[in-house]
Image (cartoon, rainbow, N blue to C red):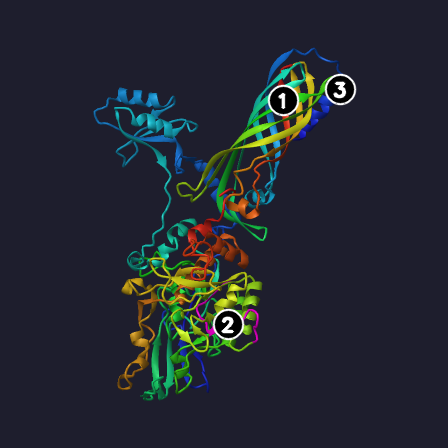
Amino acid sequence: MVAGGLVLTLRGQVDGTQLQILQAVGLPAVDEGVLQDESHSPSSNEARQRTALRQTLLADRVSATGTHYRPGRVIVRFRDEAAMADRRAAVRAASGTGEISVRPSYADFDIVRIDPSEDAEEAASVLRRRPEVQFAQVAHRVHALMVPNDPLYQSMQWNLPLINMEKAWDIQPQAGSAITVAVIDSGMAYQNAVITATLPAFKDEFGRQYPALGRVTIPYSAAPQLVAPGASSRIVAPHDFVNETSTPFDYEGHGTHVSGTIGQLTNDGIGTAGVAFNVKLMPVKVLASAWDLLFAGFTNISNVGGSDDDVARGIRYAADNGAKILNMSLGSSGPPDCATKPNQADCSPVIEAAMRYAVSKGCFITVAGGNEFEDTVPPFGTNPTSIVAEIASRIPGAVSVAAVDRSKAHAYYSSTGSYIELSAPGGSERGFGSNGFVRQQTFDFNFTDTFLLPPSQFVAPRFDVFGYIGYIGTSMAAPHVAGVAAMLMQQGVTDPAAIEELLEKTAVDLGNPGRDDTFGFGLVDARAALRGLGLAK
Amino acid sequence: MKGLGFAVGLSLMVAASASAQDTPGLSIRPLVMATEQSFAAVDSFNAVFGKTYFPFFGGGAQIVIHDRFFAEVTASRFRQTGERAFLSNGKPFPLGIPLTATITPLEVTGGYRFRIKSLPRVRPYAAGGFGSYAYQETSSFADAGEDIDTRHFGYVVNGGAEFRLHRWVGLAVDLQYSHVPGILGNGGVSQQAGESNLGGVAARFKLVVGR
């Protein structure tokens, strides 16, 4: 029952000797093994029975204003000077069956019991008009309004209330627990390790020459708010398509931040919250960072990022290994007419084929809409089409996500076009400063991006220092939608096209009425999507 | 329903062998009623409740003039709990959030009773009229104003036969079509399904007391 221990894995990056990763270093965790009971998932028969029974037992009434209240009782505070006989007379005037109950503990009021078939609102109204009564009211139903106790949630995470997450968590407190979300990105800080690498001399994009550091030992840690100690089972089938390994370590911080928005540990009194904080996470690395290149012995780090083949393979891998939601906070610019001419240069038919494959396997895909609204990208001009997002817009079951700032306005960088389908918080510093960032736990880049220092100060990085770092971008917007989609799938909407349709139908319309090129169908509303539709409303 | 079917069969046999009854010029006859309605909003009811036919229970009264003309007032009630849902390409996705719908029709009809010489205890009839339909819809996790409590008018036509079981007791069986616009089709899965009629076709069984 105890798992863990030391696993020594040699991970050759190019020549087989460059990089060593000593995985899972640390004390072993206590592992209770697999618990098979899934009766608390909302789509299980048991859960539905519980809900139906609870509803039956509660048998709420609905007031004239639409609020729910408990039948059979009125809450009354009698005036102190009112004699018991007068109190009883007041109750008799309000209800033929009313009786004053024994006062409950911790109450400075009385409960008047009436027949459940009687109109408690009317009884309360009559009582309010009596001189013996200070106040009288029906017993309104209240329910948990989950506000995470993570300290930074209240102070910094404007983004989650913006998409109505608190009421969504009320509907689904387990927040996507049976769903695996693949984060197709720069990797993820999901495991403790010790990395040994040989760092060569290199030039940066400005031509500055950095010295070789030789053989260095680099500490690496799981982000503590992504993977709790002993909870490594949260991580499913990790894979690195950049280095062709099964250790997709994030050396950049982007994938870890994106993962935090999807599933940061929540309500644990620490740090920030995530949208679907109980999902399983599948790190799929397709974006290379500067350190990936240096660890692999490259001597020029100006060409970081990913490529279509890695991305396409990552999508197919995720679909074949149990992921149900794929988040792709990545993209590239290209021509606007890939839909009609997919084989022209700068289109990505290989990614389109992979995305269609994943959706056909039941995966829902979120794609960042692009950050080039103000940018000019030759030869495509200003605000070029974001190719992967454009592909998503043509696939029912994949969505492209634009970014809004904390005032629900268009984020200045968020690309616009006919391919934009939904909006979510991406943040903006304009007008808000650092209060406009989307914050999640990821590496403190002062310790990771040492190649940004002057060559004379260059040192080996360390990947075990974390902070709650503010990012902005449609990369941050897309994982909000991925998290909500995971909760929808947990709730029973298992068809990717249906998830897209539901998200779009329940989005809060922004900008011009109806779908527009800036916000798509509008700002995703987690509560409205999870609640679905009634018969007539 | 089987019991009602048996009663209908029995009443036919009794009716066929019985002689005609004296009938007053004006009679007021209370009734109790059980109805099995197949809702016209098939996709909407399937999505939320998993089926499309449900019972109503109620009662009312008839005024019969010279055993030919009659007016009838009935009130009945349907109450069912299902789940909030979403329709996509016609496929329902229930979301596990309880939804309770209550329909309370108040219907007023007028019609004509026919006589068949060879079946003196049988009175075929046809009627038409209108109804006022109260509709309430409540769901878990509703904010103020999100539940529905409304009332709309609709119309009904029906036809069937009454079988005299006893001098003072009759059993009426008919089919009724109701059309109730204005409640469905403005939102929810009914809007998705493009269905706007809360009515449908109902088999009604009425136990009538009086001559």
The quadrant holding residue B203 is top right
Mark 1 and mark 3: Cα distance apart in space: 21 Å
Residues at circles 1 and 3 in contact by the CB criterion of under 8 Å: no
Closer to the N terminus: mark 1 or mark 3? 3
Instruction: From the viewer's perspective, tell me whether residue A35 is left or right of residue B72.
Output: left
In the image, residue A441 lies in the stretch drawn in magenta: no
Q: Position of residue A317 (x, y in %)?
A: 53, 70
Q: Position of residue B25 (x, y in %)?
A: 65, 11
| Mark 2–mark 3 distance (CA, rounded to whole Å) | 79 Å
Q: Is residue A184 visible?
A: yes
Q: Which mark is residue A518?
A: none
The magenta region covers A324-343
Q: Which residue is mark 2?
A: A314
Q: What residue is pinned by disc 3?
A: B116
Q: Which residue is mark 1?
A: B207
Judged from the image, the secondary structure of the residue bearing numbered disc 3 is loop
Which of the 4 quarters of the picture holds residue B27?
top right
Amino acid tagged 3 = Ile
Q: CA distance from mark 2 to mark 1?
A: 69 Å
Q: Chain of mark 1?
A: B
**Chain of the residue under label 3:** B
